[in-house]
Image: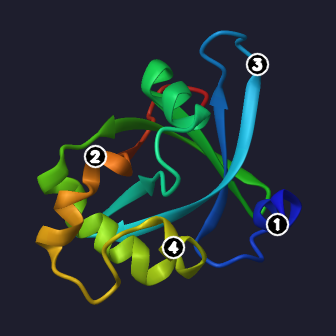
Amino acid sequence: MSALVRAGIVPHSYLLTTRGRRTGRTRANPVTVVEHAGRRWLVAPYGVVPWVLNARAAGRVGLTRRFRTRHYTVREVPAHEAAPVLRKYVGVASATRDYFRAGKDDSTEEFEAEADRHPVFELTPDRTPGN
């Protein structure tokens, strides 16, 4: 799956790279990136998994698609800001819908109620030289 994502064959998907918070090793996971309100967002549909902890610790991630990697700083957002992103995510990432209580046609308020189970990060291009 990672090879297909890296090549850009799977829609909306990227290969996320994070630095391990304890080991310092690079870790890679396929993820779905959502565009909403003119910004890019990263959603953790399975909850607080290792890549979430690594992103929180490092404050930055890499996203690879079509063999091109871009680096981003990440900001975890509160429930009221995450809710519309989660709603959009469920509409795009159908394979993960079973992990959400709210359905794609449910209200934003219903997504806000479960936002603590699905961390959401705003992605901002990292303008550090060399990235």
N-terminal label among 4 and 2: 4
Q: Nearer the viewer, mark 1 or mark 4?
A: 4
Q: Amino acid at mark 2?
A: Asp
N-terminal label among 2 and 1: 1
N-terminal label among 1 and 4: 1
SS of the residue at dot 3? loop
Q: Circle 1 is placed at which residue position?
A: 7
State which quadrant residue 88 falls in.
bottom left
Q: Residues within 10 Å of mark 4 (few under 14, many from 20)?
A: few
Specify whether 80 is left or right of 117.
left
| Residue 85: x %, y % from top left | 29, 65
Q: CA distance from mark 2 to mark 1?
A: 32 Å
Q: CA distance from mark 4 to mark 2?
A: 16 Å
Q: Amino acid at mark 3?
A: Arg
Does residue 89 lie above or below 52 as drawn? below
Q: Circle 2 is placed at which residue position?
A: 116
Q: Residues within 10 Å of mark 2 (few under 14, many from 20)?
A: some
Q: Residues within 10 Å of mark 3 (few under 14, many from 20)?
A: few
